[in-house]
Structure formats: structure tokens, C-alpha cells
Image (spheres, rainbow, N blue to C red):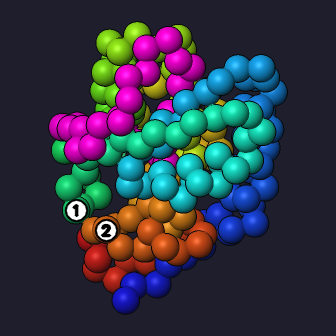
Amino acid sequence: MPQIQPLLDAETIAARVREMGQEISRDYAGEEVVLVIVLKGSFVFGADLARAIDLPVTMDFLGLRSYGDGVQSSGVVEITTDLSKPVAGKHLIVIEDIVDTGLTMDYLFKNLATRGPKSVKLASLLHKPARTKVHVDIDYLGFTIEDVFVVGYGLDFAQKYRNVPFLGVLESDGVLE
Ligand code: IMP
């Protein structure tokens, strides 16, 4: 099993997620919000961020696939599980684990716009600006990171490491070569 080089420890992540929750609570005071949690990578971040938001939120889940089991984006995005309810007239906050090339969020925002929401904002735990192909506005950002492939805190490599409680980089023993 490859070693994971720690990048962001659990306490650092928790402190930032609490701040993001407070910011969202202030910005949407008095409003009802639907948190759109993007599966699978955002299930940990989404669970923590939702509990840091002091508002009457509802939650829905949307499965997207933009990666194979490797580390390169295919550029092809598909909805594998759709939202359970219409979102017309609702304030939406999309909760994403990482914006890498931006292709996935660009696709999702265009798709959500066709459903007539009142507003759509993006909360992303991570951003890798070095790999941008399409610009995406991130309204609430946890951390900007270098061009490294990270796992843990919900993020996977070949579906593994999602349960690692911190964010780290897989040490190259050939696995990412
Ligand atoms: P984008 O379309 O290139 O922005 O890719 C976004 C998706 O790629 C994320 O939701 C992740 O599923 C995946 N991804 C991108 N970078 C990483 C990474 O460093 N670790 C794990 N998954 C990643």
C-alpha cells in the first residue's frame, strides 16, 4: 500500500470548513438553501460543511463522473445520479471536493441553469489553478493547492483512500507514474 504524504491535516481542514460555514450562514441569512452535494468525492466535505451552516438547509445529491480510474480527466462529464427534486426558484449551493480543469463544474453549472434556480453558487474544498482549462467562479473556497494528485477526506485514487481523514499526496512508488 503506497504511503500518503500529508498535505492538510484534519484540524486545519475542520477549521477552514467551519469558517466557510459561517460565511455561508451570514450570506444567506433568512433564506432557504438547497445544498447540492456532488458524489462521490464531496460526501465527507459536504457532511462537515452542512453541519457548519446555521440555516434551514435541505440537501440533495448528484452523481457526476468526469474521471476514469486514472488521474487524467477524460473531459467527458456525465450525470450518474440526478437530483431527487426540481430546483426551480431555489437558492443552490453546489458542494464540490476539487476544481481541477474546471470541466466538471462548467458542465454542471450549465446544466443547473436550465432548471430555473433562483441562484447557484459554488463551494469547493480545493482548487488546482495550474490545471485550469475552463474558468469557474468559486464563491467559497477552502484551499488552493499545487498541481499534485490528492487523496483522502472523500477524494479517491481508483476509488480508494476516501476514508483517510486528512488530505495527502500518494507517494510515487510507481503507482502514479
Ligand atoms: P475537473 O473537471 O478537471 O475540474 O475535475 C474535477 C473532478 O476530478 C473532481 O470532482 C474529482 O473527482 C477529480 N479530481 C481532480 N483532481 C483530483 C485529485 O487531485 N484527487 C482526486 N480527485 C481529483
Residue sitting nearer the eye, 9 or 84: 84
Question: Which residues make up the magenta segment?
Answer: 76-101
Above or below, 42 against 62 in this view is below
Q: Residue at x 27, y 43 (%)?
A: 81
Looking at the rendered image, the quarter that the C terminus falls into is bottom left
| Mark sitting on residue 57 | none
- Location of mark 1 (residue): 69
Q: Residue at x 29, y 58 (%)?
A: 71
Above or below, 174 against 124 in this view is below
Label 2 neighbour load within 10 Å: few <14, some 14-19, many 20+: some
Residue 77 picture location, percent across and down: 22, 37
- Compared across the picture, whether 160 is left or right of 30 comes to left
Residue type at the position of mark 2: Gln
Residue 165 picture location, percent across and down: 59, 72
- Location of mark 2 (residue): 159
Residue 102 picture location, percent across and down: 38, 33
Residue 3 picture location, percent across and down: 46, 84
Q: Quick check: is 38 in the magenta stretch? A: no
Determine whether label 1 and label 2 are within 8 Å by CB.
Answer: yes
